[in-house]
Amino acid sequence: MNDTPTPAPTTPGGEAREILLDIAARLASIRPTHAFTDGRRMAMILTAVTNRRGYMTDAADELEAEVLQYAPPVDRAITRGEYALILRRSAGGDDE
């Protein structure tokens, strides 16, 4: 038996990637020069996950955990547009 942990993928899969890119698009297109906070990051992620998987379901918890792996906390002054760039990079780039 191999006890070595499997490393996390370098980019998110499916729905998590879609959520990251959807949030990035919204941040970049609506008030991109305004300040962005960690509370807003959490609210946007929770809303997106709830819309896809329901409120407080096991499936929502799993998806939220995956999205949070790739959406770094906001720990400095940053604009919505700057954070959109971070999310796009975390998602592995924007296919659009």
Image (cartoon, grey):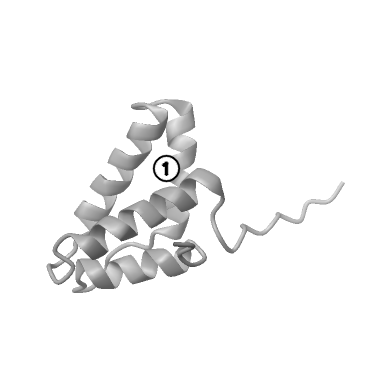
Query: Above or below — where is 80 with respect to 45?
Result: below
Q: Residues within 10 Å of mark 1 (few under 14, many from 20)?
A: many
Q: Please give left or right for residue 18 compared with residue 35 in the image.
A: right
In the rendered image, the residue lying farthest to the right is 1
Query: Vertical placement of 59 versus 1: above or below?
Result: above
In the shown orientation, is residue 91 left or right of residue 6? left
Q: Nearer the viewer, residue 72 or 13?
A: 13
- Element type at mark 1: helix
Of 3 and 54, nearer the camera is 54
Q: Is residue 7 left or right of residue 28?
A: right
Quarter where residue 85 is shown: bottom left
Residue at x-position 35% and y-position 52%:
22
Q: Is residue 23 above or below residue 80?
A: above
Residue 66 can be seen, yes or no: no
x then y, percent, for residue 66 = 49, 48
Q: In this view, does 13 lie above or below 84?
A: above
The amino acid type, in three-letter code, at marker 1 is Glu
**Placement of the C terminus among the 4 image quadrants:** bottom left
Q: At 22% from the left edge and 62% from the top edge, which residue is drawn?
A: 29
Reading the image, the residue beneath label 1 is: 64
Q: Position of residue 68 (x, y in %)?
A: 41, 52
Residue lying at 24% horizontally and 70% vertically, measured from the top left: 81
Q: Is residue 40 visible?
A: yes
Q: In this rendered view, identify the residue nearer to me: 3 or 27.
A: 27
Residue 82 in the image, given as x and y percentages of width and height: 27, 73
Q: Identify which residue is drawn at 87% across, 46% down.
A: 1
